């Protein structure tokens, strides 16, 4: 996909393998938090439950900031490719109410909140097609300037959407995207990049933060 996922999870709905990247029917515990809500569970339980947040129609405008901006600074723009989309913690990204049994490094959950036919990229040291490392290799993403080719521009339009944990953080200074591969009991591999460094396809970051989801074709 060339945009971040912007799906509001609905706890009144039963998701099925016919419409979602999951192996069996799933009924979420929680709906996506609306724009008027700042609730986010940052406790130890927050590592394992599913949480997501809809910041509204916010579009990263291409600003690069060493210190980061807030969601309030992101206004309606014209390039929908740079739509920030929703923020998902790891549980929401892999469409699970409880991920506590998945703790082994390099364990691949191989399911997601992505639509059927799409999935989360792999990460860690995986170099297969559809993995973050494969994308980095193909596009030679080593720079954070807006010059082409790089991660923040045509053709894939990754965004510096930062993260969410009750407040926004690091918008315009970092882009963080979930993979489906476990790093530890409280962390997961992801693609990370920022204003002042190279792109890393094997970052490992805390599961309870809300980060972007970018689906790839299965």
Image (spheres, rainbow, N blue to C red):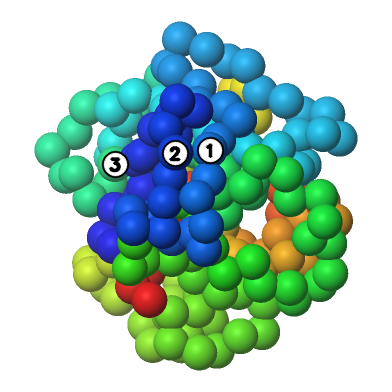
- Looking at the rendered structure, the secondary structure element under dot 2 is loop
Q: Which mark is residue 84?
A: none
Q: Residue at x 44, y 18 (%)?
A: 34
Position of 23 relative to 49 (above/below): below
Image quarter for residue 89? Answer: top right
Q: Earlier in the sequence, mark 2 or mark 3?
A: 2
Q: Residue at x 42, y 17 (%)?
A: 35
Residue placed farthest to the left in the image? 78
Residue placed farthest to the top in the image? 36
Name the residue carrying label 2.
14
Between marks 1 and 3, how big is the CA–CA gap? 27 Å
Q: Residue at x 77, y 42 (%)?
A: 47
- Looking at the rendered structure, the secondary structure element under dot 1 is loop
Between marks 2 and 3, how big is the CA–CA gap? 27 Å
Is residue 133 or residue 90 the one in the foreground? 90
Is residue 144 or residue 17 the one in the foreground? 17
Q: Which x, y percent locates residue 127?
A: 55, 89
Q: Is residue 19 left or right of residue 162?
A: left
Using a 10 Å C-alpha cutoff, classify the residue at mark 1 as few (fewer than 14 neighbours), some (14 to 19) or many (20 or more): some
Is residue 89 or residue 141 the one in the foreground? 89
Contact (Cβ within 8 Å) of mark 2 with mark 1:
yes
Q: Is residue 82 left or right of residue 34?
A: left
Q: Earlier in the sequence, mark 2 or mark 1?
A: 2
Q: Quadrant of the N terminus?
A: bottom left
Q: Which x, y percent locates residue 200?
A: 60, 70
Name the residue carrying label 3.
83
Name the residue carrying label 1.
27
Figure label count:
3
Whether residue 115 is visible to the viewer of this picture, yes or no, is no
Q: Earlier in the sequence, mark 1 or mark 3?
A: 1
- Looking at the rendered structure, the secondary structure element under dot 3 is loop
């Amino acid at each position: 996909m060339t945009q971040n996922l912007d799906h509001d999870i609905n706890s009144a709905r039963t998701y099925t393998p016919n419409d979602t990247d999951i192996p069996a029917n799933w009924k979420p515990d929680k709906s996506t938090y609306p724009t008027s809500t700042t609730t986010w569970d940052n406790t130890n339980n927050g590592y394992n439950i599913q949480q997501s947040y809809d910041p509204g129609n916010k579009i990263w405008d291409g600003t690069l900031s060493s210190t980061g901006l807030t969601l309030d600074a992101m206004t309606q723009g014209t390039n929908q490719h740079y739509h920030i989309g929703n923020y998902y913690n790891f549980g929401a990204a892999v469409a699970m109410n409880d991920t506590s049994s998945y703790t082994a490094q390099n364990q691949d959950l191989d399911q997601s909140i992505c639509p059927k036919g799409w999935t989360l990229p792999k990460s860690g040291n995986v170099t297969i097609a559809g993995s973050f490392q494969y994308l980095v290799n193909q596009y030679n993403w080593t720079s954070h300037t807006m010059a082409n080719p790089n991660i923040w521009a045509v053709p894939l339009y990754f965004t510096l959407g930062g993260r969410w944990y009750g407040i926004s953080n690091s918008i315009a200074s970092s882009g963080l995207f979930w993979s489906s591969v476990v790093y530890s009991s409280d962390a997961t591999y992801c693609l990370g990049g920022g204003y002042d460094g190279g792109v890393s396809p094997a970052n490992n970051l805390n599961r309870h933060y809300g980060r972007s989801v970018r689906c790839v074709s299965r």
